[in-house]
Image (cartoon, coloured by chain):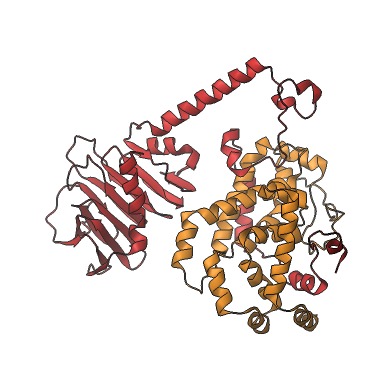
């Protein structure tokens, strides 16, 4: 029994054999090219002035802030200086913070001129629109930046996008797509998305105007007839189309980006079915793949509670 | 470009009678360097990166065994640190600040859908970091003694640490391998110091149990030496 145990304290030292064993686990070393690349990126990164609210998530202050009680500021001149403003100033500050929060909420929920908004269910770590990076804190700006022709990349996590009350999309990690055509709500043109990589799940909304949503992958084009489906581009193999509601038409990928109707042969993938289109444009069928349609539950909820 | 002189290594916690650390800590930044860092002077940034890169990457990689995920997280952490330097107060201890950010980023990753999906989808051959279900499956399939007999002891320690619950694993790594004080760890994981000490003690006990009987371990260690 060691001294710590005699004093009723937990044992805090590994015994010699365990310590030797633990010391045999070397510190993992990063690949040299990654180390050099990150070093260059870190040293060359532009300095951004960020607000404190953006940094809260990381709990940047390991030192706890001392908050003196009312009137105690003078008794704690060193520790309480930050919060020792007179009461009136503090109220003003609180009102200002509430106003800023309300404005931020309004911006978050307010439909952007592009018609797109980012649903709060999103947990992406970074997204790019035409190469410009947006953090989750900049979701409003991200949505505003989306316009016909935009190239959208999701780096990590998922990004749920809602277009007016027409359609909700969930883009999986490492997805890359181009919004080829996004017509105004009253224009009877197809919404056309060129999905270059990754996964996308779709649930159409209450104002979805019929079969005017098309998703093109490197292998196929999917037209929504029903309401709920997911498309996964599986690199070098093909595209997987899972239908969870209604049905979708699966076409050969047209040669041009023209969103107009084209007389191409198609197959119908119905609810509960998966169509896999390989590089030779052969379609195999099977049951839905649960992982592919999982984001659909999130999208259903978006329409259900109007988020 | 002028560089700050390197200082010889030292331990931040002189009361560290618990044997924490394996000489992993090199050196910290001087007060002048910290001030320069707060001002984001290039030579201070360079020094900061060189001092902390291996520590942070090593910490993350020990928690998240997948190399690509560890690289992504390290990149995220350092770019976050870069931005956050505008709010850094040089009077604050640097190491807890850095490891707080690193720990929170790893936590975010563990709770992300990316990680959850990967954990559900990958098979046993994948070596991503640590959902409990997988830990249990691994421990059923490969007992600690088999591990010790079959592969190098250092790897056996890595495997055993991976099987520890998340909270114990973080505490063990921060205390033993990163040599943070219990007080610093308590701030990082948002628990009181007594709880952190208990966690560390439990982590050591569970680790020893996972690695087999002490005398058996001792024989193997002697064999390694």
Which chain, by letter, is red?
A
Which chain, by letter, is orange?
B
Figure check: A139 above or below A178: above
Instruction: Report the side of B200 relative to A119 (left or right).
Output: right
- Measured as percent of width and height from the top left, residue A98 is found at 52, 25
In the image, what residue occupies the spot 55% across and 79% down? Answer: B141
Instruction: Report the side of B3 relative to A52 (left or right).
Output: right
- Measured as percent of width and height from the top left, residue A265 is found at 13, 61
Quadrant assignment, res B132: bottom right
Extreme residue in the left direction: A263
Figure check: A298 above or below B208: above
The quadrant in which the C terminus of chain B is found is: bottom right
Closer to us: A304 or B73? A304
In the image, what residue occupies the spot 45% across and 60% down? Answer: B117
Q: How many numbered marks, from 0 up? A: 0
Instruction: Report the side of A84 relative to A103 (left or right).
Output: right
In the image, what residue occupies the spot 29% across and 64% down? Answer: A288
Figure check: B93 above or below B114: above
């Amino acid at each position: 029994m060691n001294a710590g145990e005699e004093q009723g304290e937990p044992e805090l030292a590994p015994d010699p054999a365990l310590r030797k064993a633990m010391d045999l686990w070397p510190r993992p070393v990063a690949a040299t090219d990654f180390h050099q690349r990150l070093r260059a990126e870190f040293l060359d990164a532009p300095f951004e002035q960020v607000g404190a609210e953006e940094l809260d998530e990381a709990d940047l202050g390991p030192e706890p802030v001392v908050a003196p009680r009312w009137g105690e500021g003078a008794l704690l001149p060193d520790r309480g200086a930050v919060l020792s403003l007179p009461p009136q100033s503090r109220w003003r500050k609180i009102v200002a913070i509430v106003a800023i929060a309300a404005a931020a909420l309004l911006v978050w929920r307010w439909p952007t001129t592009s018609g797109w908004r980012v649903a709060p269910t999103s947990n992406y770590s970074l997204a790019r629109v035409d190469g410009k990076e947006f953090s989750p804190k900049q979701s409003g700006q991200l949505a505003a930046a989306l316009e016909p022709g935009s190239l959208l990349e999701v780096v990590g996590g998922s990004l749920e996008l809602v277009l007016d009350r027409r359609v909700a999309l969930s883009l999986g990690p490492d997805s890359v797509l181009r919004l080829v055509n996004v017509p105004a709500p009253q224009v009877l043109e197809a919404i056309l998305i060129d999905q270059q990589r990754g996964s996308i799940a779709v649930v159409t909304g209450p104002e979805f105007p019929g079969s005017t949503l098309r998703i093109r992958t490197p292998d196929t084009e999917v037209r929504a007839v029903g309401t709920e489906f997911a498309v996964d581009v599986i690199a070098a193999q093909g595209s997987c189309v899972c239908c969870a509601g209604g049905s979708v038409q699966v076409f050969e990928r047209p040669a041009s980006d023209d969103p107009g109707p084209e007389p191409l042969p198609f197959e119908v993938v119905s609810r509960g079915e998966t169509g896999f289109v390989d590089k030779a444009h052969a379609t195999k069928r099977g049951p839905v793949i649960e992982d592919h349609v999982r984001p659909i539950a999130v999208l259903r909820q978006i329409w259900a509670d109007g988020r | 470009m002028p560089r700050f002189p390197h200082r010889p290594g030292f331990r931040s916690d002189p009361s560290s009678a618990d044997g924490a650390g394996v000489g992993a800590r090199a050196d910290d930044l001087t007060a002048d360097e910290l001030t320069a860092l707060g001002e984001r002077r290039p030579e201070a940034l360079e020094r900061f990166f060189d001092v902390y890169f291996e520590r942070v990457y090593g910490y993350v990689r020990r928690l998240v065994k997948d190399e690509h995920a560890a690289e992504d997280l390290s990149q995220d952490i350092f770019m976050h640190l870069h931005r956050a330097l505008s709010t850094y107060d040089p009077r604050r201890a640097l190491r807890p600040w850095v490891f707080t950010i690193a720990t929170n980023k790893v936590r975010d990753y563990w709770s992300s859908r990316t990680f959850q999906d990967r954990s559900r989808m990958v098979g046993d051959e994948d070596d991503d970091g640590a959902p409990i279900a997988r830990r249990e499956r691994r421990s059923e399939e490969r007992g600690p003694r088999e591990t010790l007999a079959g592969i190098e002891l250092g790897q056996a320690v890595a495997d055993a640490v991976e099987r520890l619950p998340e909270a114990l694993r973080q505490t063990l790594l921060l205390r033993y391998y990163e040599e943070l004080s219990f007080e610093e760890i308590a701030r990082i994981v948002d628990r009181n110091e007594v709880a952190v000490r208990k966690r560390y003690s439990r982590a050591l006990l569970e680790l020893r149990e996972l690695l087999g009987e002490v005398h058996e371990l001792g024989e193997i260690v002697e064999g390694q030496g």
